[in-house]
Each structure stands twice: as structure tokens, then as C-alpha cells.
Image: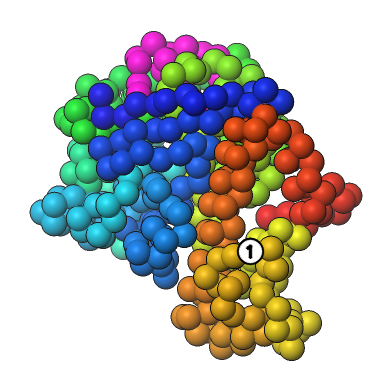
Amino acid sequence: MAITYELIKTCKQTGARLGKVHTPHGSFETPMFMPVGTLATVKTMSPEELERMGAQIILSNTYHLWLRPGEDIVEEAGGLHKFMNWNGSILTDSGGFQVFSLSDLRQIEEEGVHFRNHISGEKLFLSPEKAMHIQNSLGADIMMAFDECPPYPAEHKYMKDSVERTSRWAERCLEAHQRPHDQGLFGIIQGGEYEDLRQQSARDLTSMDFPGYAIGGLSVGEPKDVMNRVLDFTTPLLPDQKPRYLMGVGSPDSLIDGSIRGIDMFDCVLPTRIARNGTLMTSQGRLVVRNAKYARDFRPIDENCDCHTCRNYSRAYIRHLVKSNETFGFRLTTYHNLYFLLNLMRQVREAIREDRLGDFREEFFEQYGFNKPNAKNF
Ligand SMILES: [Zn+2]
């Protein structure tokens, strides 16, 4: 089997899991945050920098690579790892999320989804078989089943039809998958905020015995307490000996709260996207480096951070670069934000090892300011 999960221990205080996922390109520790490299690059970062900051697995987007440069070119290059010179693990999504979020002219049928290319307007069709073919050509260690991502909120009736179609599509994905020996295919549990539908989805998908499971359809605009409630009743439906991936989640509080609910893997564009706006995650909360008050502030972005950016550059300098649209400024902010989340997950793993993740959450939330009534989140 391409992907295996090793449960090292469970936190006695919270039930969070410390583990390792083994892939054909090495192992990564969990809970883990995966930086997003949409177009086979984590914007502004080199693979060497990602390695230095402690990234062990990155995500790339099937939809975007399909449109450019085309999966055939990546395959000809020897696969995604070789093409982008990243020797760690890679996960590709199925393209489903982009089809549903980027294109407005789409039509869902049993066979698949008709839609228009968000760049050229050209008519395209994506199906479970096509999504598997593209991902097999890209050659990531972990691939995702093609699912429907319904909007939030969605009616129970709509969601039930969607969950059932997603289960049928998952079966077709398993059948179409050509490289199970060196690529692990994960199933995606859908069902929105409905407990009965999450149960149905989990039952369908776990019966197909995927090497890992994702929880989809969260972080789509629902309040955080809804997300936590859905996780509370969904993660216990998943097998203990397989990794669990919460898709599209990357705010510091949700990474901690997700880990507490038994999630092993997370991804999100949040840290890289806000970095390119000059917004930083720090141990004291959010810092918008463009603000005038940092013009003469020669302290590092985060005095508690030992990343390359914080060891060498000041808020004043980074503010100047970001305001001048200098690429180097975005490299420094991106490096810090990714390091911040990777380091947060290191601390989460340490806290699980020592059975004190509940205490860690309290301290972190207090310092970050999440406990304040009008705390600025992301
Ligand atoms: Zn830093």
C-alpha cells in the first residue's frame, strides 16, 4: 500500500493523535500543516526554503496544473516531484473544489461536471475518471477522490443527493485509479452540517477501504462552532488506523481545535495569501505590517519567532518592501507565515506527546487574543 499511518500516541488530555504518515517520498509527522503550491510552486518560496522551514508535505492543485502547463507535460518531465524539484511528499486535490468555486457556468450530471475554463472561457468536462487520469499523470503521493463541493448553507435534500453522488463518484475513482501501488487515494466525507448525512457519507466511503479520509465541505463560510460540532460527530466515524485530513483549514485556532478533534492533516492558502497582503500571524495575534505605526519599528515581526525573517529583518524594513511592492518583501512575509504554522504544529505535536494539548490551547488562545470578545481572526 502506498500510504500507511502509524499512530504513535493519543493525548490523554484531549484525544488528539500524534502519528506519522508514510509515503513513497518519505514520512511526515502528524498533526501536520501542508503549504499550498497551487501551480507546482508555493508562491515566492523555493523548495529548498520549504525544506529548511520544516515543510514535509505540500499540496498542489489538479485543476490548475491540468489547464497549465497540462498534466502531459508534467508526466513527461518525470512527474510533479521531478518537475518542481521537491523530494518530499505531495498531495494533489481532485480539481472538484476549483470547478465548483471558480467557474460559474457549470452543469452537474451523473457522468461529471461541464464548466468553463476560468481563464479562457473554453468548455471543459471533469469526471471521476478524468480527475484520476490527471492525478495519475501528475504522480503525487496522495491523490483525492473527485467529489461535489456544495455551497454553504445547502438544503438537506440537495445535500443528500450530493452525498450519494459523491459516493458513486468515489467508487468510480477507485476503479479508474491506475497506480495504487505508489499513489494513495483518499476518500472525502461530505454532508455539510447534517449529522445523518455525514454518517451516511462516512459509512459509504469507509466501506470502500481508502488508505485515508478527508473531511470536506468545511471552512466554506460556516461559523467556527459549526465546524467544531461537525468534527465532533464526524471524526469518530473514521477508522483509527488511517490518516484524517481536514481540507481548507489553516487559521491557528482551527488547527489546534481540529487536532484536538483527531485531525492529522490540514492545508490552506491562508498563510501564503495574507502574506502577499502584508498580513502576518504572530504569537501575539494578527499583525498588518503596512500600518503606519510600524514605519520606525525595528523589532522583528514576532519577537518569539526564530524564523529566517524574524532573525534578520525588521518590521520597518518589511513594511517598506511590502508598500513598495518589492518581491523580496513578499518572500519574507510568506516565509514567516508558513514557518509560524509549521512551528505551531510542532508545538501541538510536542503537547500531545506530553499529554497537555488542552493547556497549550488555553495558553495559545490567551496570548493570541482569541479569548477577547472582539478578537481579530482571519
Ligand atoms: Zn518569523
* Badge 1 element: loop
Residue at the (57%, 62%) spot, across then down: 337
Residue 261: name its quadrant. top right
Task: Name the foreground residue: 104 vs 11.
Answer: 11
Vertical order, 226 against 86 (above or below): above
Residue at the (43%, 52%) spot, across then down: 55
Label 1 within 8 A of ligand 1 by Cβ: yes
Residue 44: name its quadrant. bottom left
**Residue stretch in magenta:** 197-215
Spot the residue most to the right.
373
| Numbered-mark total | 1
Color style of the picture: rainbow
Spot the residue most to the left.
76
Residue at the (63%, 63%) spot, across then down: 305
Question: Of the residues shown, which amino acid type is indicated by label 1?
Answer: Cys
Residue 136: name its quadrant. top left
Residue at the (67%, 29%) spot, across then down: 355
Determine whether, in the image, residue 346 is placed left or right of residue 100: right
Determine whether, in the image, residue 149 is placed left or right of residue 346: left
Vertical order, 51 against 62 (above or below): below
The question of residue 153 being in magenta is answered with no
Vertical order, 112 against 332 (above or below): above
Q: Residue 165's x, y, as percent?
A: 40, 22
Vertical order, 92 against 120 (above or below): above
Determine whether, in the image, residue 371 is placed left or right of residue 103: right
The question of residue 213 being in magenta is answered with yes
Name the residue tied to disc 1. Answer: 305
Q: Residue 1's x, y, as percent?
A: 25, 24
